[in-house]
Amino acid sequence: MFKQALALSLFQAVANAAPAGTPVQAAAAPPATFTADPSIGPGGSSYTDSPHFRVYGATGTTGTNTVNMLEAAYSCFVDTLAWRSSGLSFNDASDAGPYKKVNVYSVSSLSGNAAGVMHSDAGMSWLEVVDTYLTVPGVTVHEYGHGLTYAAKTWVDQGNTGAWWETVANWVADTYKTSPLCATARSKYGQSTSATEIDLNTIIGNSYLVLVDGTANYYEQWPFLSYLTYNPDNFSGLGQSTVYQGFAQYSKNSNETPLHTYARLLKSGTIQQVVGRYWARMAFADIGHPTAQSVFLAQRNSLNYANLDSQGSGVYKVKSARQPRYMGANIVPLKKSGTVTVTAKITTSGSYTATLSIRNTSTGVTRYVDFASGSASASVSSSEEAMVVVANTPALIVHDAFNIPSTVSKGLDYTLTLTGATA
């Protein structure tokens, strides 16, 4: 959760930048310890300090554990992944500093029963976190994720990125807790690897929704960012820097959506192919994440796959209420017996990316067969299981995920014909 109270808008910051042709000097290395500024937020006399943070209202073990957690997050995202430092002001066009500590305030409660919130003041983010959640990374590192997004500048005051702030913050928290990318940072500050909080009931059970829907799944859809980061399909241009490059390469003041930026990062393939393959891999939660698939295997029998109505003779029609919307998908488990050749055909007037997702239940090895000219066929052995995945992948649409227009909420109406298996 975040709130913004900008002293200077992004437009003004750009307008006040050095004119074209001004020599650019390399920024000096940041100091080992940043300056504390009690005027950012309400201030206070009781606090715990660390090189990059000051936590007000928490001392002793709680204060120490909180700053160690935040220092580990800083080390991962700023030192390892090269994000813009949270110690730099939003208004600092040169990135020369001064560098200031991020102030975190322990409070007894917040409005709306929130666990935490990010604010901004004088170009610096500051956080409020309810005291009982202070050492919980899913809250405090999530809010710090907002601070990092704010420090990156380009998404500020861009309404069409709004819902994605929560997607990114949850990705930051999960990456901090689970990812090998943050393992060295966690170890340096004595932080353990934690369990993922992936919500498969939302992601898979409601996969038909708009990819990031500000009314339904915008907190939960962070695995899409994990897929871009781990890049198991080796799309050129994607990888561990993708989320930050989504800020750095954002078209300033364009109010474009993050998908538009990610599309420009690609050096091979299209964003429609990326989204299609993300959903194909989500069929078995095979997105490169270290523990998402183990959660899937434990929960899969409780997930909602009721996407189709049988029309008889191997023909199925998508339920009107579950037609995949913009960049959403249907995931359809198949039933078969023994080793068979499965053929699937899709009939629709819409734009889509479809895949046969196949997993060996003995070895865990997965493979993916793309639909071409409306159909796909594969031999599926007795030790393999298969799903058909149909993603709605039209041309990109500029929109606000908190106010989804009809062009984005419109579902993909299609018919699926199967031989060799049933749905």
Image (tube, grey):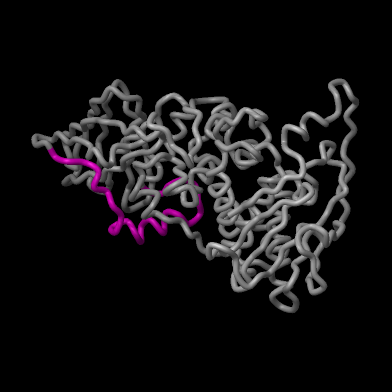
Where, by quadrant of the figure, is residue 265 drawn?
Answer: top right
Report x, y in % for residue 86: 75, 50
- Rendered view: 219 above or below 258: below
Q: Residue at x 72, y 51 (%)?
A: 120
Report x, y in % for residue 80: 71, 49
- Rendered view: 319 above or below 20: below
Residue 363 magenta: no
Q: Is residue 373 left or right of residue 24?
A: left
Which one is nearer the viewer's eye here, 394 or 321? 321
Which one is nearer the viewer's eye here, 291 or 7? 7
- Rendered view: 231 above or below 47: above
Where, by quadrant of the figure, is residue 336 drawn?
Answer: top left
Q: Which residues are magenta?
A: 284-310
Look at the image and tell me whether residue 234 can be seen: yes
Report x, y in % for residue 146: 64, 51
Q: Is residue 41 left or right of residue 19?
A: left
Where, by quadrant of the figure, is residue 320 drawn?
Answer: top left
Report x, y in % for residue 395: 44, 24
Q: Is residue 262 left or right of residue 285?
A: right
Look at the image and tell me whether residue 193 can be seen: no
Q: Residue at x 78, y 35 (%)?
A: 13
Residue 306 magenta: yes
